[in-house]
Image (tube, rainbow, N blue to C red):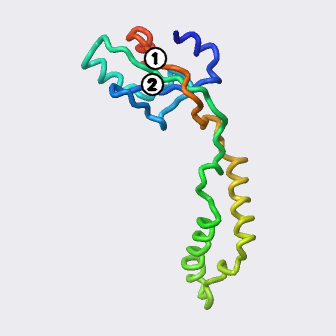
């Protein structure tokens, strides 16, 4: 069953299913080998308790790349707060009477600055391993012989 998914590694994401049937959404990997290696300690613990345990891997279609700007960290509000903090801390040491210099930046310019920051991050951060999780394809059951070769 694994072979079907090995032939098209760029189409799927994989994650380990725990004993309760839960999938750790933040722990998807781009290969079965990566999933097993990322969960190595837990798998070795399982083997100590039950030496013939099978593993269940959930397979999902791989979605599009996630851009850093899609994380939504740098919004106009956050950029404004950063500028407010710069007002408080950045200019005090220079003996400036009015330290609200960044407060004078109009909202439209804050929006431009936010777009510039997000565009800069999208162009300069390597996001090649950050994909959206697509629809569930199926579960694969791996025998001890199949998954121990990746440990």
Farthest residue to the left: give it.
49
The one nearer the camera, 48 or 109, is: 109
Residue 138: horizontal and vertical position, in percent? 51, 20
Q: Secondary structure at mark 2?
A: helix
| Quarter where residue 137 is shown | top right
Q: Is residue 114 left or right of residue 41?
A: right
Residue under pointer 2: 37
The quarter holding residue 84 reads bottom right
Q: Position of residue 49 (x, y in %)?
A: 24, 19
Residue 132 image point, x, y percent: 60, 36
Does residue 129 appear to the left or right of 111 in the view shown?
Answer: left
The quarter of the picture where residue 7 lies is top right
Q: Is there a contact, CB below 8 Å, between mark 2 and mark 1?
A: yes
Which element type, helix, strand or loop, lies under badge 1? loop
Q: Residues within 10 Å of mark 2 (few under 14, many from 20)?
A: some
In the rendered image, the vertical position of residue 129 relative to residue 46, given as above or below = below
Picture disc at residue 81: none
- Which image quadrant: the C terminus? top left
Q: Return the residue at label 1.
A: 150
């Amino acid at each position: 069953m694994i072979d079907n998914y090995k032939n098209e590694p760029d189409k799927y994401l994989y994650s380990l299913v725990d004993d309760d049937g839960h999938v750790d959404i933040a722990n998807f990997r781009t290969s079965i080998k990566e999933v097993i290696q990322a969960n190595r300690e837990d798998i070795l613990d399982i083997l100590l308790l039950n030496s013939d345990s099978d593993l269940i891997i959930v397979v999902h279609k791989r979605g599009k790349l996630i851009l850093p700007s899609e994380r939504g960290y740098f919004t106009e509000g956050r950029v404004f707060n950063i500028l407010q903090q710069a007002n408080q801390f950045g200019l005090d040491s220079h003996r400036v009477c009015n330290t609200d210099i960044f407060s004078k930046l109009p909202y439209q310019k804050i929006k431009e600055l936010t777009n510039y920051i997000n565009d800069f991050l999208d162009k300069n951060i390597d996001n090649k391993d950050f994909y959206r999780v697509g629809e569930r394809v199926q579960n694969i059951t791996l025998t001890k012989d199949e998954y121990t070769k990746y440990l």
